[in-house]
């Protein structure tokens, strides 16, 4: 399983911030800003991705309170949510292709969560990862 984890946490961080910004901008980039449910789902999803990124224990985290494994699980959950959101909130049938960016970005989130290393390579962050894991266990 770990041989599939080829994305370093630093690169994952870059992808996180790009995906968060892309989600927030997607209603205007992909032309579904006239659908309130699609627009707000994308914006809120982007804010969640950015907030989680800021709090993750990796090279681009600021607060570093969320262990990388938990971050990757959250990415997987967000990815699944994005994939099903167009049908869950009813904007898949609005005559637009608003569903497509959600499915593509959602699948990218799931894929990156499955392919990213679970421990940062930087020693201080790897040590912090062990400390965070110990706090959760104890």
Image: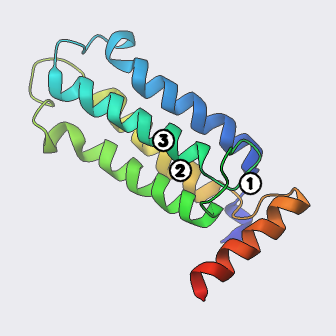
Residue for badge 2: 111
Q: Are marks 3 and 2 in contact (CB under 8 Å)?
A: no
- In the displayed image of the protein, which residue is found farthest to the right? 123
Q: Residues within 10 Å of mark 2 (few under 14, many from 20)?
A: some
Q: Give the SS element for disc 2.
A: helix
Q: Is residue 125 left or right of residue 112?
A: right
Residue for badge 3: 49
Residue 90 position within the rendered picture, expressed as x and y whole percent measured from the top left = 9, 35
Residue 10 position within the rendered picture, expressed as x and y whole percent measured from the top left = 76, 44
Residue for badge 1: 6
Q: Quadrant of the N terminus?
A: bottom right
Q: Give the SS element for disc 3.
A: helix
Residue 42 position within the rendered picture, expressed as x and y whole percent measured from the top left = 33, 30
Q: Is residue 77 above or below residue 60?
A: below
Q: Residues within 10 Å of mark 1 (few under 14, many from 20)?
A: few
Q: Residue at x 43, y 35 (%)?
A: 47
Q: Is residue 36 above or below residue 131?
A: above
Q: Is residue 61 left or right of residue 31?
A: right
Q: Residues within 10 Å of mark 3 (few under 14, many from 20)?
A: many
Give the CA separation, mark 1 to mark 3. Answer: 21 Å
């Amino acid at each position: 399983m770990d041989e599939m984890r080829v994305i370093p946490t630093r690169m994952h961080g870059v992808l996180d911030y790009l995906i968060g910004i892309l989600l927030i901008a997607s209603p205007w980039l992909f032309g579904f800003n006239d659908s309130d449910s699609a627009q707000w789902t994308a914006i809120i999803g982007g804010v969640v991705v950015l907030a989680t990124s800021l709090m993750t224990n990796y090279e681009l985290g600021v607060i570093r309170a969320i262990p990388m494994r938990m971050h990757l699980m959250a990415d997987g959950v967000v990815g699944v949510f994005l994939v099903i959101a167009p049908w869950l909130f009813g904007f898949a049938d609005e005559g637009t292709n608003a569903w497509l960016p959600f499915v593509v970005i959602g699948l990218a989130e799931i894929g990156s969560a499955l392919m990213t290393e679970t421990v940062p390579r930087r020693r201080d962050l790897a040590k912090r990862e062990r400390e965070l894991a110990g706090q959760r266990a104890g």
